[in-house]
Amino acid sequence: IRESPNIMEISDKEKSLKIEPIFITIDPMRDGPDQLKAYLSDWHPRFLGLTGTQEQVDDVCKKYRVYYSKAQMGPNPMDYLIDHSVMFYLMGPDGDCHEFYAKNLSPADMAARITDQIDAWDLTH
C-alpha cells in the first residue's frame, strides 16, 4: 500500500491530472483530519483524506464490501488493532465504480489499467 503514491507518478501526466486520489479511513476514532493529513503527507500531495462518524464509515465499508475487524488489546478503549482488506477503487466521473484493484497488483500494472480506463472513458464521453 505504501507504493500506491507511485501510481500518480507513473501515469501519463495529463491523465494523472484527471485522477483525484482519495483515502478513506476505517478508524475514525483515531484518524481525525490532522492525523490523516500527517499520515498522507508521505503519500502523493494530491491525496485527500476522508473521515466521518463510525456510522458513515460503516456505511461506506458496506457499500464497497470492505472487511475490517477491531480487536481490543487491553483495558484502554484506544488500545486496539484493526485488521482490514486493502482495495483501491477507480470511480468514474459518473460516480460509478469502474474497476477495483487488490494490493497484489503492482503500481505499474495498476497505473496501466487506470490509463486504459481513462482512455476508454475519453473515447465514449
Image (cartoon, rainbow, N blue to C red):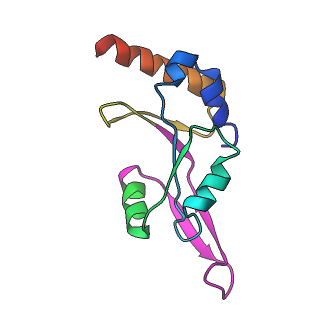
Q: Residue at x 67, y 31 (%)?
A: 6
The residue closer to the viewer here, 88 or 104, is 88
Q: How many marks?
A: 0
Q: Is residue 71 magenta?
A: yes
Q: Quadrant of residue 4?
A: top right
Q: Where is residue 49 drawn, in percent x and y?
A: 53, 50
Residue 37 coordinates in the image, percent (x, y): 61, 53
Say whether residue 51 is left or right of residue 86: left
Q: Position of residue 114 (x, y in %)?
A: 50, 24
Q: Quadrant of residue 120?
A: top left
Work out which quarter of the rendered image holds the N terminus and state it.
Answer: top right
Q: Nearer the viewer, residue 5 or 69?
A: 5
Residue 116 lies, with reference to residue 104, above or below; the image says above
100 horizontally vs 72: left or right? left
Viewer-closest of 95 and 112: 95
Q: Is residue 65 visible?
A: yes
- Residue drawn at 44 percent across, 69 percent down: 54
Q: Is residue 106 visible?
A: no
Which stretch did the figure color magenta?
A: 63-89
Q: Residue at x 66, y 53 (%)?
A: 39
Q: Residue furthest bottom?
A: 75
Give how far across and how far down residue 125 sits, in percent.
28, 16
The reply to whether the magenta stretch includes residue 82 is yes
Q: Is residue 96 above or below residue 120?
A: below
Q: Residue at x 66, y 88 (%)?
A: 75
